[in-house]
Image (tube, rainbow, N blue to C red):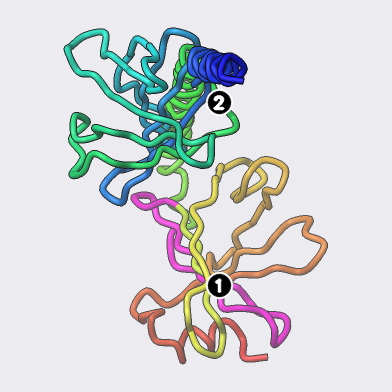
Amino acid sequence: MRILLKSVVVALAGIALVACADEDFTGAYRFKDSNLKGPMVLNIHGEEAELFGDYGKDGIRPLGKMRVSVKDGKLLLDDVNSSLRLAMKRNVDERSLDCLNCKVLGMKTDEHVWQYDPKGPYDVDELLKEQARKREEAMNAELERVRDEAMEQGRRNSEAPKLTPYEGDWVYQRTSKTDPLIIMGIWREKQIRVWTFDFASFNPRGKKTPGFEVADAGLRIGEEGNARVYTLSSDKNTLTCVGCAKAERWVKADPNKDLSDRYYARKLAGNH
């Protein structure tokens, strides 16, 4: 009987040793604190590990690389560039990790739970390459946008002197009670700007700076595909849309009067 018990004890001890030896911490673990910009991620794969910050739309930031070892069921992480060692053990949930000395990372206390991340482990090098690619694409797109804006502004500036016959503040002639109050300023210096207001309250609804071109047919306003051509009346006080499906006219405001006077603006627009 004593021999049998001894055999059982030896067998159980052997099983325990094998279990400890087989402990595999491969995976990713996250720690989030209110003082951090984003969660820290511990990424373990084989005998190597990385620590990086995950800042969501701002991407990831590598924080360090570590060598992985296991001793007495504890996970030991040794920084490859310093003597820093981080010690952890498996949490009671058998998935997450309990940090044993997190103060070495600058935290206020040693004991913190690093939650298991089922999406890990990550290929950090690939994540960084993809991040660099997206940032380069975004930068190129921004450079293209700035270039296009500069080219468009250059074109507008070259067209601006041709606006002389059309200069003034113009008010859209309403055709129904549901139409808003629309004011269009045409000036060589500030070019073309269009403001829309609620007719009753005079509250602003929006502002646009449409593209324009002065052509033989008249003043073309709007973007390609949606542009409208306007001709100037002989007395230079009315702009009329040419070829519009619905009649559209604008009257020129008296330069000696202020269109911020809602009563005057409404009168010009037509109080239908």
Residue sitting at 54 percent across and 20 percent down?
9
Which percent across, then down, holds residue 213?
A: 56, 42
Residue sitting nearer the eye, 157 or 95: 95
Q: In this view, does 168 lie above or below 17?
A: below
On the image, the x and y values in percent for residue 191 come to 42, 51
In the rendered image, which quarter is residue 48 located in? top left
Judge whether residue 29 is colored magenta. no
- The secondary structure type at the circle numbered 2 is loop
Instruction: Judge from the rendering whether residue 244 lies leftward or rightward of residue 38; answer left or right.
Output: right
The amino acid sitting under disc 2 is Gly
Position above or below: 248 against 264: above
Say which residue label 2 marks: 120
In this orientation, does residue 23 appear? no
* Picture quadrant where residue 77 is located: top left
Residue extent of the magenta highlight: 167-191
Say which mark, if any, is on residue 182: 1
Q: In which quarter of the image is residue 113?
A: top left
Residue 171 belongs to magenta span: yes
